[in-house]
Each structure stands twice: as C-alpha cells, then as structure tokens.
Image: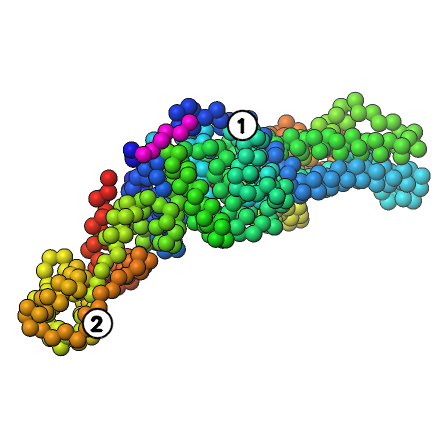
Amino acid sequence: MIEVKGLSKRYGPKTAVDGVSFTVQPGMVTGFLGPNGAGKSTTMRMIMGLDRPTSGTATVNGKPYAAHRAPLTEVGALLEAKAIHPGRSARNHLLALAATHRIPARRVDEVIDMTGLTQVARKRAGGFSLGMGQRLGIATALLGDPRTLILDEPVNGLDPEGVLWVRNLARYLAGEGRTVFLSSHLMSEVALTADHVLVIGRGKILADAPVNTFIDAETQKTVLVRTPDATRLAELATSDGVTIASDEPGLLTVTGLDAPAIGELAAREGIVLHELTPQTSTLEAAYMALTADSVEYRTGEPGADTPAEAAAPEGANR
Amino acid sequence: MTATAVAPATQASPSPYRRSFGGDVRSEWIKLRTLRSTWWVAGATLVVIAGFGLLTAFLNHASLSDEQLSATMGGIFTPTEIITSGAQLAYLILAVLGVLVVTNEYSSGMIRSTLAATPTRVPVLLAKAVVLGLTSLVLTVVGLVLAALVAMPVLAMDDISLDLADADAQRTLWGTLVFLVLISLMALGFGAILRHTAGAISTVVALLFVVPIVLFPFNNDVITEIEKYLPSSAANAFMTTSDAAQQGLALLSPEAGLAVMIAWAVVPLVIGAVLLKRRDA
C-alpha cells in the first residue's frame, strides 16, 4: 500500500508536483496516467525516496521507504530502464544489488529466468536494446520479492509480445495480493491493465477512480445537432447535467442528452432538424481532453466549458 | 482492500532478506570487480610502481658507475626511494579510481538502483570508502613488493642490500602506503561532492599538481603557510626522511602532516555524505 499526502515538488519556480494526495491499494493494479512532464516520474521518485519532497509525505506499507529494514522486499521499482552501468553484465548488476540484502544468487537467476534474460545475462548491459533494458529493470524490481511494485512506463520500448508479458505480469502480481502501481502516458494501456486509475496533469491529480467508473464518466456521449433554430433548441434543452456548445451558427454539440431525447424534444416543439448525429468520444480522446485542459489552466483563462465531470470521480472511489 | 485480494506468502511470513552494512560492502566489492576499468587501473598501478622501481634502480646503477652522471644527478637514491618512486604517479591513478567509483554511478544512472537498495544513502558512501581503501592498500602493497623484487637484482649489482628495517625506510614505506590510500579516499569524497567524472578528476589533479606549482613562485609568508597544508606537502611531511625535511623545504611536523592528510580525506567524504543525504539522486 502506498499513501501519499499533500506531496509537492518544486524545482525553482517550476512546480512539478502540486500537493497530490492518493492511496494505492494492494491486490490491484493502479494505473498512473498523464502526459509526459505531468509529474508521474517525480511522484514515483519521491515515493522511492530518491527525490526529496518540497512538502508532504509518502509512505509505503506504513513507513517512509527509507525507514524500512529491508527496502528491496517492500518495494521493487523500475524508475528508468537503464539505471545500470553499461560495462557490467546484467547478472553482475543484479548480484551487486542482491548482495545489499543477502539475497542469494539463486534468486538472481530466478528473476533473470522470469524476465527472459537468460541468454544475455552475462553480456555487458551497454549493448542491450531498450526492451532488454526494460526487462532488466523489471528483473531488478522483482529481486527482493517485494510486496509493492512501482513501475514507471514499463512497456516503453517493448515489442507487442513484451507489452503483453508486462500486462500479464502486473495482473498476476496484483492477483497475489501485491500493490502494483504503474505509470503510462497511454490511456489504452492503462485501460487494459489497471483496475484503478489516477490521472495527473500539470502536477495535480485530475481523477482517482476505478477504471470502469472513469471510463463511464469520461467517455461522454455527445450528439451533433444541426438546426436553423439552434438558439431556441439550446434554450429548451438546457437543464442540469446537459452541456451545449456551439462552434458555428446552427450547429450544436449536446452532451448529457441522447439523440432520441433531442429528436423528441425537437418534434414536440416543432423545431426542424437538419442533422442529428450521436458521437461517442473514445477513452483516449476523453483523457486527452482532460489533461489538455489542465495545461490550459496555466496558459490562459479557463475555457468556458470546463469538464465538471472530470472532477466528479475525485474522492468518490472506495 | 478488495475482497478478492489473496494474502501471498510474502506478506504472511516476513522476508528472510535484510539490508546490512556488510551487504553494502559486499555489493560495492561486486560492483568494483565486475568493471573492466577496475582491472585496467589495478594493472596500471602495479606496472607503474614496479616499473618506476626498476627504472630508478637502473638510474641509480648508472649514476654509481658513471662519475659525470653521478655529478649531474646530485647523488644517489636510497633503496626505499627506489621502490617507492612509482608512487608519485600511482597516486594519480588511484585518485582516478576513487573518483570513478562514485561518478560512474551518476553518469550511468546506476546510482538510482543503488539508492533504491540502500535508501539511507550514507552507508553506500561508507561502503565505497571501505572497499576503495582496501583496494588501494592491497594494490600499493603488492606494487611495492613487486618493485622491491624487480629492483633487488639491480641493486645487488652495486652490492646494495635492501634494508627495510631502519626507521627512515619504515617511515617512507608506511608513509607511501598511507598517502596512496588517503588520496584515493580524498578523490572519492570529491567524486561524491561533484558527481561528475571530468569535474572531480580536474579538481583532484588541480589540487595535487596545479595549485602547488602556481603557489611555488610566491615568497610570501601567508602563501608559504598555505602551501604546507596542501595534500602533497602534508604527505611530504610524514613521508620524507628526517634529513630531507631539513633541506630548506617548509613542512609541517610529521604528525601534523599526517593529521592534515587525514583531514584531506575525511572532510571531502563528510561533505560528500551530507550532500548525498540531502540532494535528489
């Protein structure tokens, strides 16, 4: 279990992580989603005690990471693929780290086997491809048989087979009751792997919800309506939970009402419709919109149609 | 907690693994011996100490058998000077090793893995100091033994015996040993402070070679006083034999020289440890 409270990190005038609080539960995969530069890696590094928070706390299994007597058995982390000396072989790299905790060579060979590195374990890691480096990083994370895994962009550089392997591994480890916290900038990857999702943008948590809830909340069904009487239809359709946007005269984008409801309303009021098209935005698009907005907050005034729904799942989980 | 979560064995029974300082030392030893550069450095150290010993022994022999050369050389070397002659270059090699032990972790990103395993951090630097200090010690001892072995036949040509028991010889030998170990530790400290290979090596070289040369021409009381506290002068104070110390060189007493040299090793290490603890990895 990872508990983060009011965690902030500032580098000079730039705020990388801005007072985030969340809990990562054991027994499930929690996806940490956000565009590059949103603060995912910085947050993970602060949990691992590699970066000192400007304020706030992060604990793993009840204690700050550095306070554990056998840190590698508490958390295994993949924070960057090549946190390894290029002149050392994969096996020697693992043996050196294992030695700190008196982890036997048997376990080193075990994780080499698990990650499919047996063929290259005695070769210098400098020649590794990004994918092999990633596998070695995962082997390093698994070394202490940890209760919690923190994986930063674990599928980066992996081939499709590798991606599937990481997905199954994450699910398997969570199935064993471990805490699995993995970051990605790919919504589709998180949707397939995670049970719970944390979305971060510009250093702030934008959503914290079970994946299904997040998908329901974020994949809004919108309807495109073309009518000569747009103003009147907009007035009539407006109610709680309905958002209407208009990009050009005579064209409405309605969120919160489905096509039949709009059609019936128009018929009742005698409004002519030229077009009535239901549109389903993809999860990917919803995520893009959610995180893009968090960027806009900084550069200009907030847009007129801020996604109120985006904030809705926050704190609503559990 | 989800109802489906199954408590794994790892959570029910505490893991048998424990981090310890002994483990950190073993880890650092594995890191050191599994890099090719370490073996190059080790080889270079031995070659330099033994090679210079042999070279100086021949120089000594030549100077003894040639009056003209003898006059220009201004006398002959003592047997201990002969076998420790390579130390003047070897300490630079060991300084490079000391710097690399820590800076190569920063340049490669390895430091993140290291600090994840030992998040309290300071034991990492201590373990590096233990492993590096012992490595420098062993390399110097082996180098000096090799130098003695190769120089002996040359010395025998002039019927010079290698008497290492007298006080001056003992002082030079032990002094050389202590100096080389402390220099490598000083370099480790600068590596930990600067975290950058080129920067740390330049700093160490500047301190050992450039600063003494720059300060040498000045005949000012303050500067002469400062010169005494430089690592090379401090080392001279406890390494050189008693009469050499009287040859107009302004040096500290041997005891003070040793204390200053120890400070040159310990202070950068302490600063390095504090910074290691405080800074983001």
Q: Residue under mark 2: which chain is it in?
A: A
Across and down, in percent, residue B183 comes to: 63, 37
Magenta: main secondary structure equals loop
Depth order, front residue of A291/A317: A317
* Horizontal side, residue B252 vs residue B276: left or right: right
Quarter holding the C terminus of chain A is: top left
Asked if one can make out residue A186 in the rendered structure from this viewpoint, the answer is yes
Quarter holding the N terminus of chain A is: top left
* Horizontal side, residue B144 vs residue A266: left or right: right
Q: Image quarter for residue A8?
A: top left
Q: Are marks 1 and 2 in contact (CB under 8 Å)?
A: no
Question: In this picture, is A292 found above or below B110?
Answer: below
The residue at the far left in this view is: A269
Badge nearest the viewer, 1 or 2: 2
Name the amino acid, label 2: Asp
Residue identified by numbered label 1 = A102
Q: Residue at x 5, y 70 (%)?
A: A269
Figure coloring:
rainbow
Q: Residue under mark 1: which chain is it in?
A: A
Depth order, front residue of B167/A17: A17
Q: Which residues are magenta?
A: B4-9
Asked if one can make out residue B251 in the rendered structure from this viewpoint, the answer is no
